[in-house]
Image (cartoon, grey):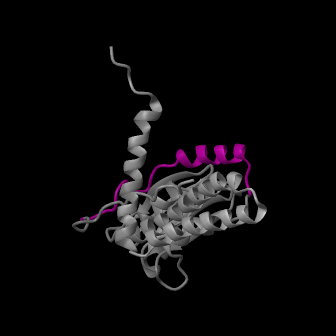
Amino acid sequence: MSKKPTDGAQERPGRLKQIRMVAQVLRQADPKALPIVFASAIGTLVVVIVIGLIAGQLWFFVPLAVLAALAVGMIVFGQLAQRAQYKVIAGQPGAAAAILKNMRGNWTVTEAVSGNRNLDMVHRAVGRPGVILVSEGPRNRVGPLLGAEKKRISRAAQQVPIYDVQVGDDEGQIPVDRLQRHLMKLPRNLNKGQVSELNDRLQALPRSMQMPKGPIPKGAKMPRGPKPKMR
């Protein structure tokens, strides 16, 4: 009777295939990216080996150099791949929601709590800073959406801080690739228990919309979020 493959054997091909797919996207988005990855890995390998030669313990530093080169290469690969994926989803409806849903930490994200027929949207994220309303769309159109949504949830939020963030390319807006960094800099105003209680109150509110009203433009799709950095 043949033995079933172990879990590691089942996972490995999928992981390698995932890396190849990300590498293809990265090569298409930036032809210089993969050479940078290889150069960083080889540079690390050479530096550590030189240190081993100077220290007179090459036998010890060669394996260390290989491990360090792999680690640096994967870190650089992950960072460049994330940037490429941000470029791919930038400008698509739902790009900000994709970023929010893939943030690290204890966040509860509710997509499209408000919107209009132009696919301008407001998403809600709840975390340690409080309530964060994130809009997508031109500045002159999303302002009223943010104001109305803030007013709608203010009673349920009570004294909890409510932040509003506009994602876009207009003056005063935040590009989608900087959204996560911006939110992570917000102060931590709540503990885990307060975040849970706040979520319960907000989830009890009726949704102001299910989908944007009116016809959705042809070809409009909600993008997938960027994959987490590879460690």
Residue at image coords 34%, 57% = 211
Q: Hey, which quadrant is residue 95 in on the image? A: bottom left
Res. 231 in view: yes
Q: Is residue 168 above or below residue 26?
A: below
Q: Position of residue 33 (x, y in %)?
A: 45, 72
Frontmost residue, 139 versus 47: 47
Q: Is residue 60 above or below residue 151?
A: above
Frontmost residue, 80 versus 158: 80
Residue at image coords 44%, 68% = 34
Q: Is residue 136 magenta?
A: no
Q: Position of residue 133 (x, y in %)?
A: 55, 64
Q: Is residue 227 above or below residue 27?
A: above
Residue at image coords 28%, 65% = 220
Q: Is residue 210 magenta?
A: yes
Q: Position of residue 18 (x, y in %)?
A: 39, 51
Q: Hey, which quadrant is residue 32 in on the image? A: bottom left
Quarter of the picture holding the N terminus: top left
Q: Residue furthest bottom?
A: 171
Residue at image coords 59%, 61% = 72
Frontmost residue, 182 versus 46: 46
The residue segment tinted magenta is 189-215
Q: Residue furthest front?
A: 56
